Amino acid sequence: MTDAPALRITVASASHVPALSDLLSTLFAQEAEFVPNHAAQCRGLSLIIENPSIGHLLVAHAGERAIGMVGLLYTISTALGARVALLEDMVVAPTHRGAGIGSGLLRHAIAHARSQGCARVTLLTDETNIGAQRFYARHGFVSSPMKPLRLLLD
């Protein structure tokens, strides 16, 4: 019996876009507010990859296969007077869930945000996704009294 390939986490490159779009389709199919849109997802992924000052996408690999991802988008908090990150699109392929990959990916994302000079990481999760809320709480995230509001622009 051979051991499974070691989990590896890297910053995404353009070659990862198709696999990451597939992972996003899995995520968006389970979220209340979004629907999968391959073309839009590829555009968004490419914009982030091509502009590292905007953010970084981190990819979890099993061998050569992308099995998870998380995005960090950067902005400035005037309240903190520092760079901060918005953690977006955290997803692990369903066949690889429950093996600690999500925890490893999240720890790596937090360390990466620190290495980029971020003073805070903020994330949004579906209000009804209690499992995700418990997962993030186990990693030190706490609820915020802030309520997100959105305005879609044409």
Image (cartoon, grey):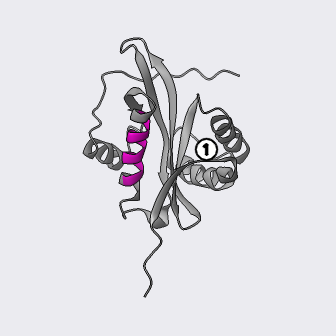
Measured along the vertical axis of the image, is residue 48 above or below residue 15?
Answer: above
User: How far across and down, in percent of the image, does residue 94 sit?
Assistant: 48, 62
Q: Which residues make up the magenta segment?
A: 104-113
Going by the image, does 147 lie left or right of 61? left
Q: For label 1, count other residues whose C-alpha is less than 10 Å away and answer few (under 14), some (14-19) or many (20+).
A: some
Question: Toward the viewer: 93 or 14?
Answer: 14
Query: Is 108 in the magenta?
Result: yes
For the point 28% across and 44% down, the residue is 139
Can you identify the residue that label 1 sits on? Answer: 35
Which quarter of the figure is the N terminus placed in?
Answer: bottom left
Number of numbered tags placed on the structure image:
1
Question: Toward the viewer: 138 or 7?
Answer: 7
- Secondary structure beneath dot 1 equals loop
User: How far across and down, in percent of the image, does residue 37 sit?
Assistant: 68, 45
Going by the image, does 25 lie left or right of 31? right
For the point 38% across and 40% down, the residue is 111
For the point 55% across and 33% down, the residue is 55
User: How far across and down, in percent of the image, does residue 29 sit?
Assistant: 56, 50
Which amino acid does the dot numbered 1 rest on? Answer: Val
Question: Toward the viewer: 96 or 105?
Answer: 105
Quarter location, residue 47: top right
* Secondary structure, magenta segment, majority class: helix
User: How far across and down, in percent of the image, does residue 23 sit?
Assistant: 57, 54
Which quarter of the figure is the C terminus placed in?
Answer: top right
Going by the image, does 27 lie left or right of 115? right
Measured along the vertical axis of the image, is residue 63 above or below residue 136?
Answer: below
Query: Is 65 in the magenta?
Result: no
Residue furthest out toward the right = 39
Residue furthest out toward the bottom = 1
For the point 66% across and 37% down, the residue is 44
Quarter location, residue 117: top left
